[in-house]
Amino acid sequence: MEADASAEERAAVDAYLGPPQDGWTGGERDAETHRVGRSGHAAREQRHLLIEALHSLQAGVGWISPGGMNYVCRRLSVPPADAFGVASFYAMFATQERPKTVVHVCDDLACRVLGARELCAELETTIGPEGTPTSGGAATWQRSPCLGMCEQAPAIFAQRAGRPDVALGGATVFAVTAVSGTGSTITSAGADTAPQTWDAATRSGLRLLRRVGHADPASIDDYRANGGYEALHRALEIGPEATVTEVKNAKLMGRGGAAFPTGVKWEAVASQLAHPHYFICNADESEPGTFKDRLVMESDPFAVVESLTIAGITTGCAQGYIYIRGEYPLATDRLIHAIAEARRHGLLGADIMGRGVAFDIELRRGAGAYICGEETALFNSLEGKRGEPRNKPPFPVQRGLFGKPTGINNVETLINVLEVLRIGGDAYASIGSEGSTGPRLFCLSGHIGRPGVYEVDHGATLGEVIELAGGPTNGIKAVLLGGAAGGFVGPDRLDVRLTFEDARAGGYTLGSGVVMVLGEDTDLVDLILRIARFFRDESCGQCVPCRVGTVRQEEAILRMVAGRTIGSVNDELVLLDDIAKVMRDASICGLGQTAASAVQSAIETFGLFGSGGAA
């Protein structure tokens, strides 16, 4: 491209990449630097920095102009058309000029039933339709999918060029205008984030969350005084093979939804002959209704760093990554601080705890793409590409990040390893049930007394978890389990046990731990339409079943809502069922395979559109 970057744009990019070294990468050109240019592998090895460089450009000037993108491409030797394809894929990047401050107002499930629609209506009255610049043109607002702050609904997230991004719960019109104003006193990522409160009864017996609300999340000394780094010390004492054995004996299953045995995954990565190995903490928590990982990262960040370090050294990795959701500014700040503190205290780097073991961590931010929670799409994003899933096999333990053996777990799975090493694998396996061991975190939101993250042993019933969170505030019409990719159950199923084996036998899902309680006056048709729209928007478009199916699913629901069906309502329901089967059987990844799950469960369970089932 011919466009040149402004001085402001160059400064924003250079703040991340450092000053250009020669004329080939954006510096001043002279006769000497024209003689040699980087090519081949030397040029391509910088590609993984692309998304963070685009983040810096966006944060500096508010959008990614042709000139700014051209400068990034020269710095990293990436073709401009390729870089534009990446930038246009992610929702947090703007390739058209817009106001420097954009306030994203969540209108997804939990926020939708707790005031988001009314908040958006007020904003339309006071500011104008979404996308309308405020007076002076410095800010605008727009609707957003779930921001991972469901316990504080309604929530907002503000991208503010030249100032820190802000995520706030309990949002009002005043809050939107406050974060938008140039004279705003809200200057830090979590200035108004309300922490979850913990009474003595709630705290009793906590394992995973025992430090949350008790230890200072910014103090490594406080973390160590509360048991921090004892698990890493034990892992170094017993060695990698014994550590894997403890995790296998614990029967720890992944907590991200797939429920794959963690010890088996670690053993598979460790046994691979190809090197280097990588380990990734998947902190791209984007499932509507899910916020447990955010709470842990904000309130106990050193636990994430320690557990990832254990995973890395156990599987033979020297490098790990935390891939965090881009809409989590406070968690990002606290993890960056925790990583730096761990390095400073010899708990990361070339010689961990003086044992001659090397492992380090880099934090990378997502940029607004739900699909990047899928592990292979996440690898592509880390490599500076569009977040599109890869075909499997080969599986990540064989060929993952940068084509090398890669282990990946989410935040909750990793911090469970600290408990496994604290009490031993066999003792951990005695908690819960035979097929679902250990404690589990559940995200309680919606019409409930005390929304928040709650820890229970596997085997607790749905009703018990709801009562732990204060019980329903307006009766129970339905409960959404597992998030938008999960399913609905009625109030007649509060006695179901929250275990993997009971969920499989009972036809429901635990997913990412979502328990969203929906009161008697909830409009379920409106919610499934929002779920359908969510999957339509978040489909990466790579495979036909998902790209087309998510659109056709939404269209069929819209026709039934409007009373303009093609044929009878029953014909539309049959069509929806066919679409669901095709997406489930033929989509490349889990997004398409589960895009119809909640919609189908709501229709079948509650007789929506006269389909039978409970009223």
Image (cartoon, rainbow, N blue to C red):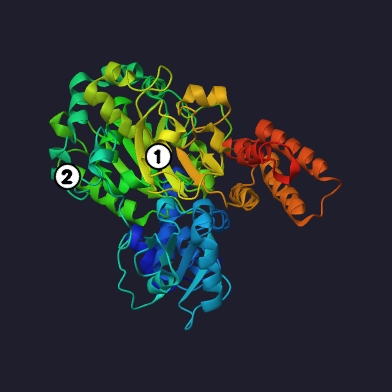
The disc, 2 or 1, on the residue closer to the chain's N-terminal end is 2
Q: Which residue is mark 2?
A: 220
Residue 275 visible somewhere in the drawing: yes
The answer to whether 558 is drawn above or below residue 301 in the figure is below
Specify the farthest residue to the bottom.
136
Q: Amino acid at mark 1?
A: Glu
Disc assigned to residue 450: none
Name which quarter of the figure residue 437 lies in: top left
Q: Nearer the viewer, residue 458 or 46?
A: 458
Q: Nearer the viewer, residue 551 or 148?
A: 148
Q: Amino acid at mark 2?
A: Ile
Give the spatial CA distance, label 2 vs label 1. 35 Å
Specify the farthest residue to the front.
475
Q: Answer few, some or many: residues within 10 Å of disc 1's Cα (few below 14, many 20 plus, some between 14 and 19).
A: few
Q: Answer few, some or many: residues within 10 Å of disc 2's Cα (few below 14, many 20 plus, some between 14 and 19).
A: many
Residue 31 visible somewhere in the drawing: no
Numbered disc 2: secondary structure: helix
Quadrant of the image for the C terminus?
top right
Q: Position of residue 193 (x, y in %)?
A: 33, 58
Q: Which residue is mark 1?
A: 467
Numbered disc 1: secondary structure: helix
Name which quarter of the figure residue 207 lies in: top left
Residue at coordinates 41% horizontally, 20% vertically from top-left?
264
Nearest-to-viewer mark from 2 and 1: 1
Q: Position of residue 469 (x, y in %)?
A: 38, 43
The answer to whether 35 is drawn above or below residue 307 in the figure is below
340 to the left or right of 606: left
The answer to whether 137 is drawn above or below residue 118 in the figure is below
Q: Nearer the viewer, residue 446 or 423?
A: 446
